[in-house]
Image (tube, rainbow, N blue to C red):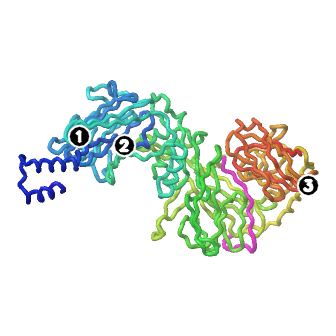
């Protein structure tokens, strides 16, 4: 446009003429002003920068956009070299065969009638190239369109699926095992001629963050978690799940095995990426039984015996939702971001929240636009109090359990035949009698669209249900345990917490429980005298009712030693110690403090994990927090010392455990 307007103005002065020095000078000035034409640049957009580290034997796409301004792209060669340079003989060579007239792959070269895939708006994908050579060849798998080029490199995981797995000369291909590789893309003709691009990738072990990519807030939290910890997350299309912009093509027989080996690689012949080396973190949120998170990723964990592995870590939102919104009793709408928590190894159940709602509005289906006013208890492990006229809905999560997996079509997807199917609860009165029992199905419903209240989706590892409706006022213990599909109790799921009902009973159940006279409340008293300065053995906590002198979340003394209530005591440490700890449990001691002031407090602790704490309260006032180190095991003891200010006289001290899996032998106070 600049050149044209200049010529029009010049013509009114004199005709353009090669012998006119003024014209030549102006033409030279114009060319300098415009500058040289920018050269086209070839890029490798996929594998993207996020996904240059992959599992051994992985297939992967090599894809890039056709540079702007190129109308006739031309042929492309894709090569893969071992090492950090494009040198030596390539281990893979692929080449397109375009129509010279337009520089793109003709539709006649595509197997549009391919029986093992489904188009999602296009068939122009490298997996479907059949000409020249045939559909089962590997060397011809490059497609060129006006928008992109794409090739699929086979690494070994799908070498028995719709391929002869040989090079152009018929030699068997070697699997792509651990190491560094260099991809080189070269334009051979048309507008891409002589353009090149390179990218390095690494095959080896990966540590994946697994979970649903919906809703959006869950996707964002999962991605942020993966980036914070440097874990693998999948942004690029798996081979067999090709997408460019909004169109693509799906081949389950290819993408499912590639997804599965990123979770647990059971391909034969791998060097470092084995089942035994697999590490994964799974978000137990909105995992639907038809999603890839369940049928491929979780099923692979179960199929390869990793459901109980310490290298498989399960995460959940402490409020049950990544962002929780509700209407408070005063009519205010409250929204907050829930923190992320982790199930301790061996734990298979965690409580997330209790909703205290009007007894006439007890629908456990999650609906974040529900207008029902309610109270929210975000620490149900510490005990739940139900006011008069209220009902309680208890929410939580469970973990996958070992099971046989019925294989799906690809052989690496499938459906576990067993899982935690229900959570049974009982309310125990002062006599130790269960006055109310029921079960909650592990199949939490969520209502996604307020305009479609009947549309509910269900989560495989979450539950929500009504607890304790209709019982008379009083203090109780709520006991929980989860059952699998066969009705068997699942280890790591027993919980116990205080449950109090205030005011008049809520007359909404058809069969009221039998009325039983309450047992006398055990008298609160010291188990032993504890003069301070001095040492106190952890097992010598005060006697009294649960929730009064002590609080333990699991029924029975799992260690079977020393005392016969629900606190777990074993032979160990200096003589006995308290173990099998679950987060939020606590013990109280009556201390006789001879000298007030600052004391040096020492705690003898053991734990194989980091991040555990003891919180110290005196007469209900928080006095200190003790960081429990990772000692190397439950019987490897260390002494941790902090300063604590104690008042003189007789006082009650509480030791509250923060975090599961820690042991306490004794503590002492010295001036």
Pinpoint residue 153: horizontal percent, then vertical percent: 34, 36
Using the rendered view, name the quadrant where residue 524 is placed.
bottom right
Identify the mark at residue 648; answer none if there is no mark.
Answer: 3
Separation of residues labelled 1 and 3 (CA atoms): 86 Å
Q: Nearer the viewer, residue 618 or 427?
A: 618
Sort mark 1 into few (<14), some (14-19) or many (20+) by Cα contacts within 10 Å. many
**Residue 274 inside the magenta-drawn segment:** no
Question: Which badge, 2 or 1, is on the more N-terminal residue?
Answer: 2
Identify the mark at residue 46; answer none if there is no mark.
Answer: 2
Kindly state the secondary structure of the residue where label 1 is placed.
helix
Q: Main secondary structure of the magenta part?
A: loop
Separation of residues labelled 2 and 1 (CA atoms): 18 Å
Using the rendered view, name the quadrant where residue 635 is placed.
top right
Pinpoint residue 315: horizontal percent, then vertical percent: 58, 49
Q: Would residue 227 be found to the left or right of residue 656 on screen?
A: left
Kindly state the secondary structure of the residue where label 2 is placed.
loop
Query: Is label 2 or label 1 in front?
Result: 1
Sort mark 3 into few (<14), some (14-19) or many (20+) by Cα contacts within 10 Å. some
Question: Which badge, 2 or 3, is on the more N-terminal residue?
Answer: 2
The image shows residue 562, relative to residue 137, as above or below, that is below
Q: Which residues are magenta?
A: 492-511
Q: Nearer the viewer, residue 194 or 450?
A: 194
The residue that mark 1 highlights is 192
Does the rendering let one see residue 434? yes
Question: Which badge, 1 or 3, is on the more N-terminal residue?
Answer: 1
The image shows residue 551, relative to residue 140, as above or below, that is below
Pinpoint residue 583: horizontal percent, then vertical percent: 71, 51
Pinpoint residue 99: horizontal percent, then vertical percent: 17, 42
State if disc 3 and disc 2 touch (CB < 8 Å). Answer: no
Identify the mark at residue 477; answer none if there is no mark.
Answer: none
Residue positioned 35% across, 44% down in the render: 45
Using the rendered view, name the quadrant where residue 251 is placed.
top left
């Amino acid at each position: 446009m600049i050149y044209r307007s200049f010529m029009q103005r010049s013509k009114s002065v004199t005709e353009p003429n090669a012998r006119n020095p003024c014209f030549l000078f102006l033409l030279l000035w114009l060319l300098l002003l415009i500058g040289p034409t920018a050269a086209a640049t070839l890029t490798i957009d996929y594998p993207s920068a996020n996904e240059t580290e992959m599992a051994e034997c992985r297939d992967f796409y090599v894809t890039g956009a056709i540079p702007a301004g190129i109308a006739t792209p031309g042929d492309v060669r894709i090569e893969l070299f071992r090492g950090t340079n494009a040198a030596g003989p390539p281990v893979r060579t692929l080449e397109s065969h375009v129509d010279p007239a337009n520089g793109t792959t003709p539709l006649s070269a595509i197997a549009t009638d391919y029986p093992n895939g489904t188009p999602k708006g296009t068939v122009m994908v490298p997996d479907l190239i059949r000409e020249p050579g045939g559909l089962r060849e590997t060397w011809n798998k490059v497609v060129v369109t006006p928008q992109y080029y794409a090739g699929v490199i086979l690494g070994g995981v799908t070498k028995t699926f719709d391929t002869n797995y040989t090079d152009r000369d018929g030699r068997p291909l070697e699997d792509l095992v651990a190491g560094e590789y260099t991809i080189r893309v070269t334009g051979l003709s048309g507008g891409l001629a002589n353009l090149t691009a390179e990218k390095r990738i690494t095959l080896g072990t990966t540590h994946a963050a697994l979970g649903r990519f919906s809703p959006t807030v869950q996707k964002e939290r999962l991605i942020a978690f993966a980036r914070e910890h440097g874990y693998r997350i999948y942004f690029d299309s798996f081979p067999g799940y090709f997408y460019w912009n909004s169109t693509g093509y799906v081949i389950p027989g290819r993408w499912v095995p590639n997804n599965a080996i990123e979770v647990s690689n059971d391909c034969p012949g791998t060097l470092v990426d084995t089942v035994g080396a697999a590490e994964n973190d799974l978000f137990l949120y909105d995992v639907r039984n038809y999603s890839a998170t369940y049928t491929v990723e979780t099923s692979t964990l179960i199929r390869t015996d990793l459901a109980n592995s310490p290298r498989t870590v399960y995460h959940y939102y402490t409020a049950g939702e990544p962002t929780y919104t509700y209407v408070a009793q005063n009519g205010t709408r409250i929204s907050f971001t829930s923190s992320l928590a982790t199930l301790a190894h061996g734990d298979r159940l965690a409580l997330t929240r209790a909703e205290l709602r009007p007894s006439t509005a007890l629908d456990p289906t999650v609906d974040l636009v529900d207008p029902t006013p309610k109270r929210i208890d975000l620490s149900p492990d510490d005990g739940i109090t139900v006011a008069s006229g209220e009902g309680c809905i208890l929410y939580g999560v469970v973990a996958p359990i070992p099971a046989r997996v019925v294989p799906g079509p690809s052989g690496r997807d499938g459906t576990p035949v067993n899982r935690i199917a229900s959570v049974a609860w009982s309310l125990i009165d002062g006599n130790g009698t269960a006055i109310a029992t029921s079960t909650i199905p592990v199949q939490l419903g969520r209502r996604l669209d307020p305009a479609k209240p009947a549309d509910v989706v269900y989560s495989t590892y979450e539950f929500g249900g009504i607890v304790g409706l209709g019982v008379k006022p009083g203090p109780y213990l709520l006991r929980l345990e989860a059952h699998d599909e066969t009705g068997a109790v699942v280890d790591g799921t027993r919980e116990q917490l205080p449950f109090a009902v205030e005011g008049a009973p809520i007359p909404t159940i058809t069969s009221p429980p039998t009325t039983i006279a309450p047992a006398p409340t055990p008298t609160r008293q010291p188990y032993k005298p504890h003069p301070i300065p001095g040492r106190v053995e952890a097992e010598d906590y005060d006697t009294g009712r649960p929730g009064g002198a002590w609080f333990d979340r699991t029924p029975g003394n799992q260690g079977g030693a020393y005392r016969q209530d629900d606190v777990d005591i074993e032979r160990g440490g200096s003589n006995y110690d308290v173990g099998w700890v679950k987060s939020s449990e606590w013990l109280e001691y009556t201390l006789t403090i001879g000298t007030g002031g600052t004391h040096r407090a020492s705690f003898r602790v053991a734990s194989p994990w980091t991040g555990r704490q003891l919180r110290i309260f005196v007469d209900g006032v928080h006095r200190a927090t003790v960081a429990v180190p990772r000692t190397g095991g439950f019987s490897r003891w260390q002494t941790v010392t902090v300063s604590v200010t104690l008042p003189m006289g007789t006082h009650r001290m509480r030791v509250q455990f923060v975090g599961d899996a820690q042991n306490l032998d004794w503590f002492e106070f010295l001036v």
